[in-house]
Image: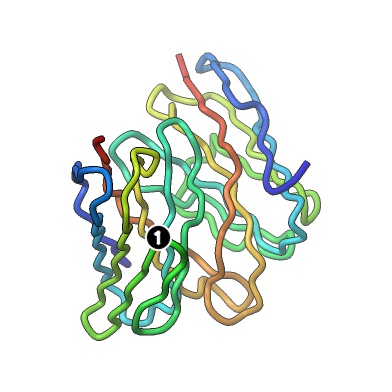
Amino acid sequence: ETGVTQTPRHLVMGMTNKKSLKCEQHLGHNAMYWYKQSAKKPLELMFVYSLEERVENNSVPSRFSPECPNSSHLFLHLHTLQPEDSALYLCASSQDGGGRAETQYFGPGTRLLVL
Amino acid sequence: QKEVEQNSGPLSVPEGAIASLNCTYSDRGSQSFFWYRQYSGKSPELIMFIYSNGDKEDGRFTAQLNKASQYVSLLIRDSQPSDSATYLCAVGWRGGTSYGKLTFGQGTILTVHP
C-alpha cells in the first residue's frame, strides 16, 4: 500500500448504528487530519492530530469521536449520526516541521450515507 | 475567520486554450498556497504549491502568487478534456507549534470542451 488509504470506501448506516472509519498513512508523516466534504461547501476541517496528540477539534459534535493509536493510523468513530452528517469524509496527512503549513495528502475518502 | 474565496464557475474553455483560475484569501499571515484538483467522486490531489511571490511553473501548470494583493492563481496551458474537474485553492497557516492547517476555497468547476 502507498500513500493514504481509507476504509470503508462506502458506508450506509442508520441513525442508531455505531461504525468506525479507518485511515492509514504510509508516508511517515507526523500529522493527520479528518475533513468533511458536503455538497456545495468547502472542505471542513474536523480534527487534527500532531505527533499522535489531538491538537484541534473544530466544534465537532460529540457523535464523532476520533482516535489516533499511533502515527500511522487514525480512526473516526461514529454513533447516533443524523442525516445531515451524510458526506464524504476525507483523511489527510502531512509532514510538518514547525515552520509553514506543508502539503497535505488525501486518502480516497469514505462516502457516508445516514438514513 | 480565515477565508478563501474562489469563483465557483463553471468555467468553460475550449480544448487547447488557457484556463485561468483565481483565488483570494483574507489572512495576510498565510505562508503557503496550494492548488488541488478533484475529479467527481474522488479525493483532492495536489497539483502545485507555491510559497513565494511570483510565478512557479510545472509542465502545463503555472501558479502565481501576489501576497500584497492576497491573490493566487493557476493557469493551465493547452487545456485538455481530462483537465475537467473542480480546482480547490488552499491557503496554509500555522495551527500550532508542530502542525499546519489549510483553509480551502469552495472550488472552481472547470470544463474543457473538445
Identify which residue is drawn at 50% across, 65% down: B101
Per the image, the residue denoted by label 1 is B60
The number of callouts visible is 1
* Residue at image location 53% in from the left, 78% down from the top: A100
Give the image quarter of residue A55. Answer: bottom right
Q: How is the image coloured?
A: rainbow
Task: Identify the residue at horizontal 67%, vertical 30% (top origin).
Answer: A7
The amino acid on which the numbered mark 1 sits, given as a three-letter code, is: Arg
Give the image location of residue A105, x and y in percent.
Answer: 59, 54
Q: Secondary structure at mark 1?
A: loop
Q: Please give left or right for residue A95 compared with residue B110 in the image.
A: right
Residue for point 43% across, 26% down: A86
Q: Position of residue A106 (x, y in %)?
A: 57, 48
- Image height of B86 relative to B104, above or below: above
Displayed quadrant of residue B26: bottom left
Relative to B48, is A115 above or below? Answer: above
The x, y position of residue B58, in whole percent, is: 46, 67
Q: In which quadrant will I find the C terminus of chain B?
A: top left
| Front position in the image: B9 or A62 | B9
Image location (x, y in percent) of residue A64: 56, 38
Q: Is residue B28 above or below residue B57?
A: below
How dense is the environment of label 1, judged by Cα within 10 Å: few (below 14), some, or many (20 and up)? few
Q: Chain of mark 1?
A: B
Figure quadrant of residue A76: top right
Q: Quadrant of the N terminus of chain B?
A: bottom left
